[in-house]
Amino acid sequence: MSFDVIKALHIIFVVSWFAGLFYIVRLFIYDSEANLKDEPEKSILQNQFKIMQSRLWWIITTPAMVLSLIFGFWMIYLNSEYYLSSPWMHLKLGFVFLLLIYHFLCQRIMNQFKNGVYNWTSGKLRLWNELATLFLVAIVFIVVLKSTMNWIYGTIGFFATGVLLMLGIKLYKSLRQKR
């Protein structure tokens, strides 16, 4: 298999992984909000959300994570001298490690919801969902800009993105409360 095919597969599975992470947290938000409804609506919705969460997690999100890692490390293996000596790759791998922690914390939330433990409000879950967006922005900018990126501007951009996301969430929340 050529390097470009491996890279294409890596990108496809990264996109699938992020899609799964974004959607699973949306399902958590809906599940959390269903927990506040009266019966029988509450049970009907939560049972459906649990089925959707399980299928999404075990059929799409986790396999995409595994395949992203396999193809990513395969690329590093094929060109280890370049990748392992590049500071941008070390930074990217640091964010990938944080993304893995995020992934398994999402799995923990899913298991808690499955067991009827609702420690997360829909508002907190909306914030949690934006953390994956920050990881996505950081990883993409690191990979695309590599060593040409000025790290000071990169850091400022990363935090500016976070601030904009938080302001967007506050705006959404205030608009939603007015309805």
Image (spheres, rainbow, N blue to C red):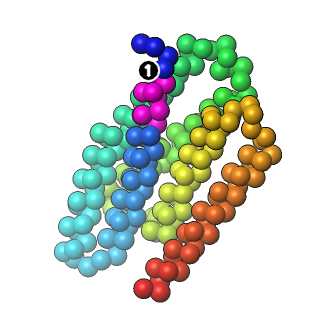
Q: Position of residue 75 (x, y in %)?
A: 53, 19
Q: Position of residue 84 (x, y in %)?
A: 67, 20
Whether residue 74 appears in this view of the structure is no
- Range of residues picked out in magenta: 6-14
Which is more toward the observer, 150 or 28? 150
Quadrant of the rendering where the N terminus is positioned: top left
Q: Residue furthest bottom?
A: 178
Q: Secondary structure at mark 1?
A: helix
Residue 39 among magenta residues:
no
Picture residue at 59% right of the left edge, 62% below the top: 165
Relative to 141, residue 165 above or below: below
Position of residue 20 in the picture relative to residue 55 (left or right): right
Q: Position of residue 28 (x, y in %)?
A: 38, 60
Whether residue 11 appears in this view of the structure is yes
> What amino acid is at disc 1?
Val
Relative to 43, residue 154 above or below: above
Relative to 169, residue 85 above or below: above
Position of residue 1 in the picture relative to residue 116 (left or right): right
Which is more toward the observer, 178 or 96? 178
Picture residue at 71% right of the left edge, 24% below the top: 86
Picture residue at 62% right of the left edge, 15% below the top: 80
Which is more toward the observer, 69 or 165? 165
From the image, tell me which residue sits under label 1. 5
Picture residue at 51% right of the left edge, 76% below the top: 173
Position of residue 8 in the picture relative to residue 152 (left or right): left
Q: Position of residue 54 (x, y in %)?
A: 29, 48
Magenta stretch secondary structure, dominant: helix
Residue 12 among magenta residues:
yes
Relative to 34, residue 65 above or below: above
Q: Quadrant of residue 92?
A: top right
Quadrant of the rendering where the C terminus is positioned: bottom left
Q: Residues within 10 Å of mark 1 (few under 14, many from 20)?
A: few
